[in-house]
Image (spheres, coloured by chain):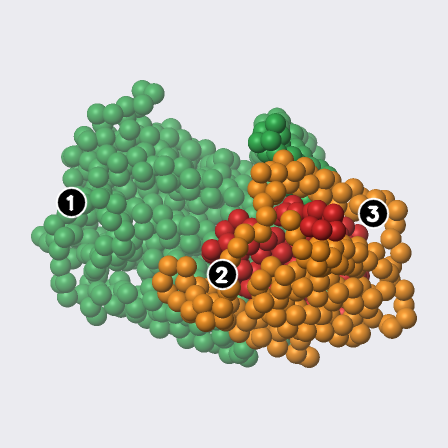
Amino acid sequence: MPLSYTIAVIAIPLLMFLFLGLVGVKMEKKLTGILGCIGMLVTTVLAYGVALTYFFGADQGQMTDGVRQAVTVFNPDWLSFSKTLVVRMGIMLDPIAAMMLIVITTVSMMVHLYSLGYMCDHHGHAEKGFQRYYAFLALFTFSMLGLVVATNLFQIFIFFEMVGVSSYLLIGFYYESPAAIHASKKAFIVTRLADLFFLVGILILSFYTNTFDFFGSEVNGIAGMLDNPQASLAQAGTASFMGCSAMAWALTFIFIGGAGKSAMYPLHIWLPDAMEGPTPVSALIHAATMVVAGVYLVARLFPLYVIEQGAMDIICVVGAFTAFYAAAIACVQSDIKRALAFSTISQIAFMMTSLAVSSAGGELIQIHGGYGLGYMASMFHLFTHAMFKALLFLCAGAIIHAVHSNENDQMHGLHKYMPITSFAFLIGCLAIAGIPPFAGFWSKDEILVAAYQKGIGWGIWMSMVAGMTAFYMFRIYFLIFHWKEHKVHTEHAPADQPWTMTLPLIILAAISVVAGFVPAAKLVTWDGAPLHTQLNWTVACTSVLIACVGIGLAYKMYYKENPLPQRLADRYRGLWTAAYKRFYMDELYQFITHKVIFQGICKPIAKFDRAIIDGFFNMLAEVTNTVSFGIRKLQSGSIQAYVYVYFFGALLIAAVTALFVIF
Amino acid sequence: MNGGLTMNLTLLLYLIPSLIMFGCGVYGFMTRKNMIAIMISLELMLNSIDINFVLFNRYLFPDQMEGMFFTLFAIAIAAAETALALAIIINVFRIAKDVDINKINKLKF
Amino acid sequence: MESLGNIIMFFVIVLSIIVFSVLTVTTRRLLRSATYLLFVLFATAALYFKMDYPFLGAVQIAVYAGGIVVLFVFSILLTQHPDDDAESLSKPRKWLGIVAALAGVALSAAALFGYAKFCGRLVPAMDDVTMEKLGRFLLSTEKWGYLLPFEAVSVLLLACIIGGVVIARRR
């Protein structure tokens, strides 16, 4: 399949969005959903074709001496700032882009199918706004696909914003619920704030490298910023600001943009609230695809980051801390979707950390010698995580759909009622916990190896977080499906959902089982050259052991109803509450924004604006008004009054003239 | 002359009635409320100006005809103006049922 | 020195102009007001005849007395109830009018008497303004010719006719 078919992969969701958005309202609700699914199916098939062609197919310029090259399918000029600085809109395929095509289309396809069932009530009637929902899904898919195949930073930025918008629209899908509105606004504002930094970073970077492009295109004869990263850095390295080179600043800013989208601490606050959206949306956007956009961004600029060690250290610290922080919170959350959201944050932080530790040694030559492992592991984990996290979220959606609640205490003991869902959820949990042979084990193992390579401390830290991951995931699992007998409190007993919802679960569960055997090391490496890895038995055994300990602990505490969790919670009341309240980050933000910024800065400015600036203009208006009303009487409209004035005026002039002439 | 009545009919003597006519026109224009009465006052004023033209022509520039022509045209234009003004007044009357200048103020403000 | 006939003529004309002018603006019946205006216009026409402008006098009678006054009478009859008395004037309004008129008259009179040099002139001898001469001037494009104003007035009258039709038409 020619690689240029990628254009169709992107165009179909766009057309679908336009079609469903414009004429969907006029159509039968179910029909729009089916149309959306068919469109997505075509997209998925094409995307698989393109990606598989890129990886395994006949050579179309992607292989040179056994090294995969980035292939720019096409790259027309879009906006010319100067002769050299041109914004282009194009399509580029490289290993991570091709991999992301698969990830996005797979999850999106599953979610499209799943939503057919999920967005209906128990009698099979489609919900209000069904067409809108599918239109937005298509919009999101388009934006995300456009993002991953972008040829330059500016295009990435544009699609970054577009995924932000579609995320905003979908979180606020239930726009009648105030919580959804607040959540959508929160998500938009936080990511927007981060994107501001991203933009600044882009501007600095492009100012010094004089290009937005990642790779130069042979057609245009231009050079990109990643063609020769050291040259790019050398250009920016000369300028420095506050002790760091311009490049370090640029890359840090870009990372902040990515951190906003990927919910890194302290910009993570929007993600748990984003769970107000429909659950399939959470699965697609806030677990599998959009939130990894930040990771993808850093991976995209990896050759630059790898040289700029300062920025890399920041990522490393932020990632490692976020992984722990989010895992700690996930251990006590009672809302199933929020717990999964914090799990997502933690896992994304894993990927970030993995990218960051990948630069250990700092010298390019060493990266060639095997230090690109972290990069590969990160991308691999991105792939597997997308699959099993989407699976977990879709399972959660099925459970919520069955019991009409997000809270753990409304669930309990569902295993008997929903065996398929339970089984799928278990596979997801095993995968994320890192139990072989499930997908998560392989990718997480690589990450841990990379972390140990960076330093033993990093390795231990990440292993601990991995253990926590196993614990909190199985805590959720046991609380939902076991713990105690389920009390049926709705009119229907909870049961496995219709096939449209179950089939995606089964497919994703199957992928989660086998995805670990994808030879990622051969395919997805930062420079395209295959990486020779082997299982590090020490790390693997330890991590499996730790995961088992975590699972065992969860089993002991949560499998059967017992007072142990409550006792522990009571004993460490402060810690428990703090974790439950997400360590008061939201309150801190509230304090900073409301008390400090709004009260302390904005209020006085607003007061000044209202009193002085507005007051001045109000005064002008007031004076004009008063005077006008005063002199309005002069314009009486009575001709005779005018004649008086005119006549006496004429007389006056005549008299004055007469005085001069006669006397 | 033989009757002992000696009087020179100077320009001044002729201008005085014209002046009074104009004064009457001003008075009427300012005080009357009926629009037709106002038009009549206007005619008075116009007429006094016509007289002035004629007089000045006759007394000061007897061998020219400017004043006379001006009067001629003024009469023509005055006729046109009056006809139109009366048409408007009648139309206003049709709509407002009144020709009182103080009551025709619907378009005010 | 003037002939007695001239003087009597003068007084008749002047007095009728003054008296009827004053009556025109002081009577409270609108129809009477129009009638007095007619007399004023006749007197004016007489003045023109006396000034040796027979054509002008004829035009004055034909257009003003014959045309405009008739229009006035028609309008008055159309808009006025036959026997409703005209408005009674409010005091301040009346006095303001009188003051304005008197002030104007006084100022002009002062100016007139100040220019006694011109105003003391007697009527000079003059050729008759024959119709032929008048017609030539009116349609001439030479110096002192009045063709352009003549045509302009014709256009004005046309516009006036159209305007009158448009305005007076019942919509």
Question: Disc 1 on helix, strand or loop?
Answer: loop
Image quadrant holding the C terminus of chain A, namely top right
Marker disc for residue A627: none
Which residue position holds label 2? C127
- In the rendered image of this protein, which colour is used for chain C? orange
Question: With A409 as the anchor, is A117 left or right in this view?
Answer: left
Type of amino acid under label 2: Asp
To the question of a shared chain for discs 1 and 3, the answer is no
Which residue position holds label 3? C93
Res. C55 in view:
yes
Q: How far apart are marks 2 and 3 (CA)?
A: 48 Å
Image coordinates for residue A375, horizontal then vertical, percent: 29, 43
Look at discs 1 and 2 and give the one toward the viewer. Answer: 2
Question: With A172 as the anchor, is A94 left or right in this view?
Answer: left
Question: Disc 3 on helix, strand or loop?
Answer: helix
Q: C64 above or below A169?
A: below
Marker disc for residue A223: 1
Q: Residues within 10 Å of mark 3 (few under 14, many from 20)?
A: some
> Residue A143 falls in which quadrant of the image?
bottom left
Image coordinates for residue C60, horizontal then vertical, percent: 63, 67
- In the rendered image of this protein, which colour is used for chain B? red
Dot 2 or dot 3: first in sequence order is 3
State the residue in front, A550 or A632: A632
**Disc 2 sits on a residue from what chain?**
C
Image coordinates for residue B88, horizontal then vertical, percent: 68, 68
User: Who's green, chain-wise?
Assistant: A
**Disc 1 sits on a residue from what chain?**
A
